[in-house]
Image (cartoon, coloured by chain):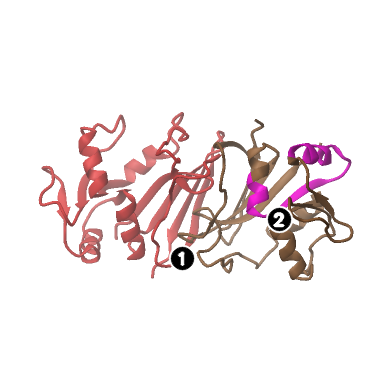
Chain colours: A brown, B red
Amino acid sequence: MRKIVLGLAVSLDGFIEGPNGEYDWCFTDQDYGLSDFFRRVDTAFLGRKTYEMTLAMGDNRGGGFPKLKEFIFSTTLDKVKDGATLIKGDIKTEVEKIKKEEGKDIWLFGGAGLTTSLMNLGLIDELSLAVHPVLLGGGKPLCQGLIAKIPLTLINTKTYSTGLVSLTYELEKR
Amino acid sequence: MRKIVLGLAVSLDGFIEGPNGEYDWCFTDQDYGLSDFFRRVDTAFLGRKTYEMTLAMGDNRGGGFPKLKEFIFSTTLDKVKDGATLIKGDIKTEVEKIKKEEGKDIWLFGGAGLTTSLMNLGLIDELSLAVHPVLLGGGKPLCQGLIAKIPLTLINTKTYSTGLVSLTYELEKR
């Protein structure tokens, strides 16, 4: 079955954005495994706000960004752009159906609301964090609104010369 | 010069206590480098609340806890227990004086208030985190009240079979 993978850059103290929404602390000097990651996925899940943000950016997400089949999760939208699929119904049922379809793994692109929903439903399979060597002291936390703590199984670590540590975990099934 | 070292157990999402103050998620099945750590320190820094907590616990901190020279930081206390030293004055001056004294490294035992003060003053030399494979989703954050982000230099990583990852950083001098 296809896996849903959440990949994020995070500060050592667990923030995905700084206190003013900034992510200027994220390293861009090398690939950090991103090309490999893009090769294993062919589908992306986007929450409504994230989808609208990508639309506003004109879908111009920079070089190397793969062509993905997109699923947009929203209870308020009535239609989405050509080629994308709107998911309005019961998330659990819909996501389990997509996971059983043929294809590569699925990139949970964000945002926070969709991530929380999928985490609480036990639908995320893998979490891959690029832990940056910085303390931000505040900002947007990695996880919000969990209904219970989530035990993880470490499956891979990689340390880069810049001090970035890539940690990959499987989420325990509930 | 002696180093001030902050050593903490932390969840992957950056909490040192769970939403209800719990730390039942902390692994106790093996040493995780604690014996080595205890051998390199001979002094502990305690904030007032942490000091009072250790007093209430009858100083019984369990087996293997080393005998340390204790410095208690407080603006409100007038005296501390025999053998300990009260630091009431200018923290920066006092701490820099202690760091220049002969001795092993210094364990910043806590708590959050003292840690924040020392971090903002650029007086902490090393941060050693035992990153536990769990998402807590809330609780007491690793860092609070930083006046600016703090860049770190990764100096060591160790991965344990249980999925605990030990990450050690030097704090950049400011």
To which residue does mark 1 refer? B149
- Residue at x-position 38% and y-position 41%: B36
Q: How far apart are marks 2 and 1 (CA)?
A: 26 Å
Magenta-highlighted residues: A92-116
Q: Marks 1 and 2: in contact by CB < 8 Å?
A: no
- What is the quadrant of the C terminus of chain A in the image? top right
**Label 2: chain letter:** A
Q: How many marks?
A: 2
Residue type at numbered disc 1 = Lys
- Residue at x-position 18% and y-position 57%: B75
- Residues A77 and B121: in front is A77
Residue type at numbered disc 2 = Gly
Q: Quadrant of residue B114?
A: bottom left
- Residue at x-position 46% and y-position 28%: B29
Crowd rating for badge 2 (residues with CA inside 10 Å; few <14, some 14–19, many 20+) = few
Q: Locate residue A148, reporting x and y percent.
A: 55, 36
**Label 1: chain letter:** B
Q: Marks 2 and 1: same chain?
A: no
- Residue at x-position 20% and y-position 50%: B72
Name the secondary structure under disc 1.
loop
Q: Is residue B6 left or right of residue B43?
A: right
To which residue does mark 2 refer? A33
Q: Is residue A7 left or right of residue B88?
A: right
Tell me, yes or no, if residue A155 can be seen here. Answer: no
- Residues A51 and A151: in front is A51
